[in-house]
Each structure stands twice: as structure tokens, then as C-alpha cells.
Image (cartoon, rainbow, N blue to C red):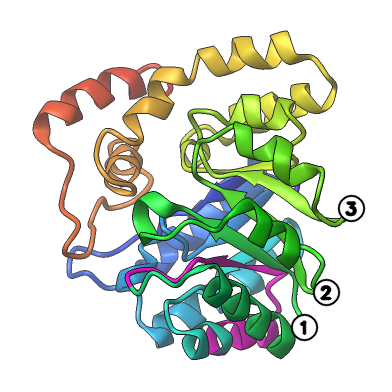
Amino acid sequence: MFHGSIVALVTPMNPDGSIDFASYLKLLEFHINNNSDGVVVIGTTGEAPTIDFDEHVTLIQEAVNFVDGKIPIIAGTGANSTKEAIFLTEQAKKIGADACLLVTPYYNKPNQKGLYEHYKAINDAVDIPQILYNVPSRTGCDLANETIIKLSHLKNIVGVKDATGDLNRIDVIKNGVDKRFALISGDDLSFVDYLKSGGNAVISVTANLVPKQMHRICEEIQKNNYSGAEALNEELQALHEMMFIEPNPIPVKWALSYLGMINGKLRLPMVELDKIHQVKLAKLLSKIK
């Protein structure tokens, strides 16, 4: 299930801040038609911290119904409360999501024993494929390699999204995890090297804009055509960098708005891309518009 380019989808919003479901479905159709290998809904890029429970469940439901099995739907269901994470993961299973993405608990900064027990509790409570999500730059805690390896042997924990950008970690992890365990890059800037080192997939912000290109890069790596993949990725390197010139999803939402695909509205405390960066990003986007 977890291979190639999986898009970390934005959540389109109307000018009043409500969810723009019409644009949401159009984005899903865009990714079905342009070779994305899967979709993550309501993750970091989908502004999960500002999505309430009712909206969260509805967004998963709309995606599952619309996609209708054409590509996997991975629902972001992580929380810094284990009880809330279990509730959202249960809802995703009932709705029919293919898997769940579970970020490490943020702000409360659990130790490794707490992280293990958090994920084990979700594993034990809900029978659905679960992907660990390690992004210490946002959460304030780092899921250690040893903890990932230990968790990989639990029934429902089937992969990790590694957004650390530390390529040394994959060599340690891949030799200790369960054989069915998927290694997924969460860093557009280093994903080619991650996949070359044995990774299975990337969960990508850049794929919101250029899904065909991201899919093709992953395809070339799968064929062991590393030089071809690197050449294709070099064409996107400036775009990768611009996607993180300000905190995600500020740049990608502005870019999608510039391309006429969504309204660029974000929910506070996120605000519009700085005008200096708008000029730079517009120049890049003019090449793909």
C-alpha cells in the first residue's frame, strides 16, 4: 500500500474560514488523474491543529467516498491525548480509511516509554494499519530509533513517516524493523536519498503542485535509475525549498491559490505568505502554470 509519491493534501477553505469541500474533491480528483500513489488527509499540511472533531471526521468521510478505492486514503488521526487519538483512529476505521498517520504527541513531550505506551494503546484499540509520524521540529519530542524498531513488531503498526531529514537513521531502522514495515520519507528536500537508501515512499508537500513529476521520480528510483531520478528531482529542488520558506502549509496554499486551484485562506494562527516570498514563488510557478 505504501509506495511512491503520497501527497500530504491541503485542506481548502472558503474566505470565511469554513471548509471548501467542492475544492477538496477537485484536489482529490486531480491527484487520482495525475498519478499520486496515495493521499494523506488532515495531516500537518491539512492544518490538523485547527480542524475540529466534526470537520475531521467529515473530511475523512468525503475523501473515502469520493476516491472509492482508486488510491489509498491515509487519515491523520494523531493527537497529544492518547484517548483522542484512539477516538479519531476508530472513526477513520469505521469510515473506511485505508490507514492512519499518527504524529508523536506534541507539547507534553513524553519520554520513550510514554511514546511506546501511547502507540501500543492505539495499536491494541483499533485494528487498522497505523503509520508512526516522527517530526521533532514541530512536536518537541523525538521517536528514537530503538522505539520505532520495538513498535514495528506490533500487529497494526506498519510504517514510519520520518520527517527528521536525518538520513543516517534509515540504515539503523531498516535493519531492525519487522519485514513488512514501510519506511516513508517526510522530507521533500532529502526524499530521493532516503528512497535510494531503502525507503518505500515519500509523503510530500511538493506533490500538491507537481504530482506527476513526484510519481515519476519515485518510479525511476524503483527501477534503480538513480541518475534519472536525481536529474528529475534537480528540476524541482528550488520548489522543494520554497515549500518550506515559511511554515507549512503557508507556501503550498499560496501556490495552489496562485495556480487557481483553491482559495488560499488559512486558519489563524497561520497567515498568508509574505509578499517578498510571493514574488519568488510566483516566478517558479510560472514555469508550471
- Residue reaching furthest to the left: 275
Q: Looking at the figure, which quarter contains the N terminus?
A: bottom right
Sequence-wise, which precedes: disc 1 or disc 3? 1
Can you tell which quarter of the image residue 66 is in?
bottom right
Q: Nearer the viewer, residue 152 or 212?
A: 152
Tell me if label 1 and label 2 are in contact, CB under 8 Å. Answer: yes
Vertical relation: 201 (above or below) 287: below
Which region of the structure is painted magenta?
87-107
Whether residue 289 is visible to the viewer of this picture, yes or no, is no
Q: Which residue is mark 3?
A: 179
Q: Find residue 50 and report its horizontal and vertical position in percent.
A: 30, 72
Q: Amino acid at mark 1?
A: Asp
Amino acid on which the number 2 mark rests in the picture: Lys
Q: For the residue carrying disc 3, how many other residues have a C-alpha within 10 Å: few (<14), some (14-19), or many (20+)?
A: few
**SS for callout 1:** loop
Residue 279: x %, y % from top left: 17, 23
- Gap in angstroms between the C-alphas marked 1 and 2: 8 Å
Q: To which quarter of the image does residue 252 belong?
A: top left
Circle 3 SS class: loop
| Foreground pick, 140 / 216 | 140
Q: CA distance from mark 1 to mark 3?
A: 19 Å
Q: Is residue 91 left or right of residue 284?
A: right
Amino acid type shown at disc 3: Lys
Judging depth in this view, the residue of 34 and 225 nearest the camera is: 225
